[in-house]
Amino acid sequence: MTIAFQKFTDSDILQRRDATWQDYLALRDSTDPQLNWRKIAFYQGWLWADMGTEGPGHASFSDLMTAIFFIWASIYPEPVLQSFGRCLIDLPETHACAPDLVLYQGDNIPRWRPGEPRRIELTRHRLPDLVGEIADTSLSLDLDEQKQLYASLGIAEYWVIDVKGTRLFAFGLTPDGAYEPIQVSQTLPGLSIELVTQTLERLTEETNTAAANWLMQQIQVVNQSE
């Protein structure tokens, strides 16, 4: 592979603005240990790859968000939820991404079978209902290029978790195909974005399991009062 990258700030994120789908495939399928990406994305010539390892902050927030999905599913088992966090998603020739959070709701959830490509292919699988990024060193990318990518795919809900700021940016897709801020989740109806933000803030002093337990208690209190 001969594609050259520019480094994004001082992180392990590499990107290029004039890449082709073939460049993406070469990087995606490379066996070169120096090109062992952790996350990857492609859209309109923008090829992005994170070559770094996952840090403790990113891992802690990522696990908390997955726990939130499981807590919600345990309290509200219908419609069913399926999490595919960090799974590679391809729409051949135009889009590729590997969101930290991938959530399906309801019917027609992708099922992987032996022998099939180890990714979600949007030519035969439907779009996720929610995707999200844990922004440790990539906040500006996640609120710009990544946001444009997910909006162009037509994914209904997009979350960006700011690790350093311990806050959640949540967006819903409008009829004209743009994201606008939302205060209540569309995929997890009734879940307040502010409540999730308060849960994230607890990570400054608590473990992620303690924060998840606190959130569960808050949801139960609300249910008991209704």
Image (tube, helix red, strand yellow):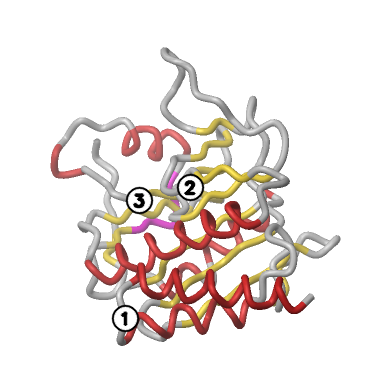
* Extent of the magenta region: 15-19
Residue hosting label 2: 97
> Which residue type does callout 1 highlight?
Glu
- Residue 152 is left or right of residue 18, and the answer is right
Residue hosting label 3: 39
Give x and y (percent) for residue 114: 42, 14
Residue 113 appears anywhere in the view: yes
Give x and y (percent) for residue 96: 50, 43
- Whether residue 50 appears in magenta in the rendering, the answer is no
Element at badge 1? loop
Disc 3 to disc 1, C-alpha distance: 28 Å
Q: Nearer the viewer, residue 178 or 15?
A: 178
> Which residue type does callout 3 highlight?
Lys
Q: Nearer the viewer, residue 4 or 69?
A: 69
Q: Farthest residue toward the right?
A: 175
Q: Nearer the viewer, residue 139 or 185?
A: 185
| In this rendering, the label closer to the viewer, 3 or 1 | 1
Vertical arrangement, residue 77 with respect to residue 219, above or below: above
